Image: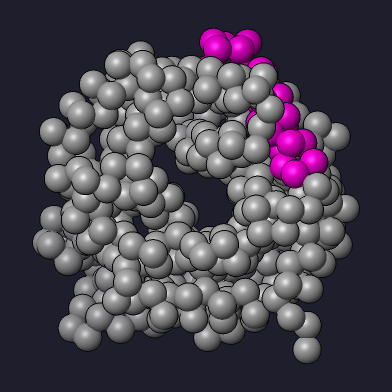
Amino acid sequence: MQTLHHKAAAIEEWTENHLIDPDGVVYSQVDTSGRTLTDALFDPESEVHLPGVSQADFWNYENCGMTTGAYLQALVFRYEAERDPAALDRAKRCYRALRHIYDMGKQLEEGFFPKIYGARFSRQTSTDQVLYAVMALDKYAPHANEEEREEIARMIANMIRFWVKRKYHFGYYHIPDMLWPLARFPSLLLLAFNHSGEKLFKDEYDRLLAEGVNRFPGESRLRRKLAGEILPTEYEKKQHAWLIHALPDAVTMDVMELDYLLRHDPGNSWAETWRKSTAMMWNEGRLALAPNGKAYTHVLVDMETGRPRRPDPSPGVPGAETGWSTMIARAGVQAAPHLTGQKEEIIGQARLVLEALAIADLTYFDGPERFGPKEKFKTRFISGDAVTNWLWAYWLGRNGG
């Protein structure tokens, strides 16, 4: 039987051979044969997300800030565990790839971290890409040379200042001036302050905390429904269950933010709230885990018992399986040190996910029969997020969380 250590080595080599673009950026998706996506893979009638951006360019790079950041984290943790110079060399390449994306953003303004569809500048960004990138830069910094550390401090400060200057507003696809979720920013502001020492970031951090922007986890899918703040839909009434979705995304981001706050500001008066939020997000995340180690894209949570079940496919609710369970596993390994009463259960669940999934299982979505004709292409991807979070979860666990 292949050990997790041998599986990690195999997944890393597969990543090196199939997921790295010429600039060192980690692709968001490749096809199930490990090839870069081409437009031939897509239904010509499927949705085009942005004018002038092909389907292949979109899906190759949509989450590349996240995937490159996650891979950088995994490689640094491997280097810390094994002191293998190859791991540090690959980590340095990921750092340069993030710097490459950052430098592209200067076409708008220094500090803008763009999505680079087709390896080209775009005016699209998102705070999840920023989160993964700056947290990875922070992890790499102790192993960087002096010039790189100075550059990392400047990059992080400028990337967060970009948002502070705009009072956390920026356009997103067809929304021209969106206010991004404020709960994400305290961790980013504290990170920027720790690298730059600029009073601006500490003052803004204190201001947002005083406003209580993260008194609840920002990405919880269930809390507001249970609190009666969101009324059940007709579908939920019929199912007598709450419908929740995108749990891997939600859990992975919130836990990353909360982990940083708990490690770097443990004496804060909000710390106990942050621990409770960490537990809430882990407990939500595990609702999506399937018996085979994958996760469900949608879950029904019974209104009386709280037990989850997989929904039957219906329009807008495929309830498909996904390899993004590795994101929940990685979040669990991050959360475990803060949740001592659940630590054994969390690590056990994360280990089950890693043991269950091989490369072929690290998909974006499964089950083409659950999707309409224009969306079946989503079941033909190996997911860079699933792959890199598998590696991050494993090496983080090896280092004790």
Q: Main secondary structure of the magenta part?
A: helix
Query: Taking the image as drawn, is residue 373 in sight?
Result: no
Query: Which of 41/391 is in front?
Result: 391
Query: Which of 193/146 is in front?
Result: 146
- Residue shown at 19% from the left, 56% from the top: 272
- Residue shown at 59% from the left, 37% from the top: 142
Can you give x and y, in whole percent of width and height, for residue 91 in the image? 72, 42
The stretch of residues the image draws in magenta is 88-112
Can you give x and y, in whole percent of width and height, for residue 287 in the image? 38, 75
Residue 208 placement: quadrant: top left
Q: Is residue 323 above or below residue 198?
A: below
Q: Please say whether residue 98 is one of the residues in the magenta stretch.
A: yes
- Residue shown at 64% from the left, 70% from the top: 366
Can you give x and y, in whole percent of width and height, for residue 259 in the image? 38, 51
Residue 69 placement: quadrant: top right
Can you give x and y, in whole percent of width and height, for residue 254 in the image? 37, 51
Q: Give left or right: position of 99 versus 266.
A: right
Query: Taking the image as drawn, is residue 391 in sight?
Result: yes
Q: Please say whether residue 204 is one of the residues in the magenta stretch.
A: no
Q: Is residue 393 above or below residue 88?
A: below
Q: Quadrant of the N terminus?
A: bottom right
Q: Give left or right: position of 38 versus 233.
A: right
Q: Give left or right: position of 363 versus 214.
A: right
